[in-house]
Amino acid sequence: MHVLITGANRGIGKAMLDQYRAAGADVTGTQRGIGELATMDVTDPASVTALATSMADTAIDLLVCNAGVYADKGQSLDDGYPHQMWADGLATNVTGAFLTVQAFLPHLRRAKAGKIAIIASQMGSDTRAPGGSYIYRASKAAALNLGRNLATDLKAEGISVGIYHPGWVRTDMGGAAAEISVEESATGLITRFAALSPANTGCFETWDGQQHPY
Ligand SMILES: NC(=O)c1ccc[n+]([C@@H]2O[C@H](COP(=O)([O-])OP(=O)(O)OC[C@H]3O[C@@H](n4cnc5c(N)ncnc54)[C@H](OP(=O)(O)O)[C@@H]3O)[C@@H](O)[C@H]2O)c1
């Protein structure tokens, strides 16, 4: 089994990479900077294409679009949320996920039953509207929508797409007060990815296996 995980140098992405490797899977972890993982900045189309091309002969069984940013925590409605913050947030969380899926579709098609996992957030659900974090919420709502429509388009090819809330996780993004560890989140998500199939493609699930309202 070959798994590709974006943003795997820290946080939930790194925990998933570690657990898949410990279980014996082939894992391509990516990071946007130079380091020991494959270099891929999801906001840079040339960088995404370059990695896809270099892996042209590889079948990918599972693509995990995990890379994400949350820069607008605590911004003021009156004078916060600058234009560039919107551009950067959407470029990573939405366009980045789409371009990654598009570039690696040939690799997913080469696998027997390819799967795509979009790491969104419960903050992207239209059923939750506590206010604030406009950029992050809008980006994760779009990521959820992207996953739902990819599920429709790819179903006939046997490629399944799941959208996931990883929990409130103690990472740089989630903060020290968050509810669960990266290990707990990764273990739960990996169990959910294993259960993803054409029968439940388009699902929006939490790390611990509950259906999340869209
Ligand atoms: N933590 C939570 O409570 C929580 C809750 C709901 C959803 N999520 C989602 O879960 C995913 C992982 O979150 P996390 O908590 O592990 O966040 P994190 O600790 O902040 O890590 C984010 C990862 O994404 C990478 N990344 C950011 N921009 C990138 C880009 N342009 N290209 C490639 N990689 C990029 C980061 O790389 P650098 O090291 O280079 O910055 C890092 O590896 C995100 O999609 C997040 O929105 C998290």
Image (cartoon, rainbow, N blue to C red):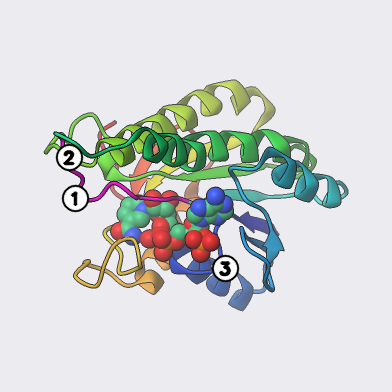
Q: Distance between the residues labelled 3 and 1?
A: 30 Å
Asked if residue 2 lies left or right of residue 77, the reply is: right
Q: Residue at x 53, y 73 (%)?
A: 19
Q: What residue sits right under mark 2 in the picture? A: 132
Residue 175, compared with residue 41, is above or below; it is: below
Question: What amino acid is found at the position of numbered circle 3 in the picture?
Answer: Leu
Residues under numbered marks 3 and 1 in contact, where contact means CB atoms less than 8 Å apart: no
The vertical placement of 131 against 65, above or below, is: above
Name the residue nearer the viewer: 82 or 202.
82
Kind of residue at disc 1 = Gly
Q: Do the residues labelled 2 and 3 touch (CB within 8 Å)?
A: no
Q: Is residue 150 visible?
A: yes
Residue to which mark 1 is pinned? 74
Tag shown at residue 17 = 3
Q: Do the residues labelled 2 and 1 touch (CB within 8 Å)?
A: yes
Q: Identify which residue is drawn at 34% across, 61% down.
A: 173
Instruction: Decide: few, some or many residues near mark 1? Use Cα within 10 Å; few <14, some 14-19, many ≥20.
Output: few
Q: Is residue 208 visible?
A: no
Image spot of residue 75 (x, y percent): 21, 45
Residue at 26% x, 42% y is 123
Q: Position of residue 18 (x, y in %)?
A: 56, 74
Q: Which of marks 3 and 1 is in front?
A: 1
Depth check: 113 or 175 in front? 175
Give the structural element (helix, strand or loop) at label 2. loop
Give residue 46's position: percent from left, percent from top. Answer: 74, 41
Q: What stretch is highlighted in magenta?
A: 68-77
Q: Report the front residue among 71 and 191.
A: 71
Q: In this view, does 209 lie to the left or right of 40?
A: left
Q: Could you tell me how far apart the alpha carbons at marks 2 and 3 are, in whole angstroms? A: 32 Å
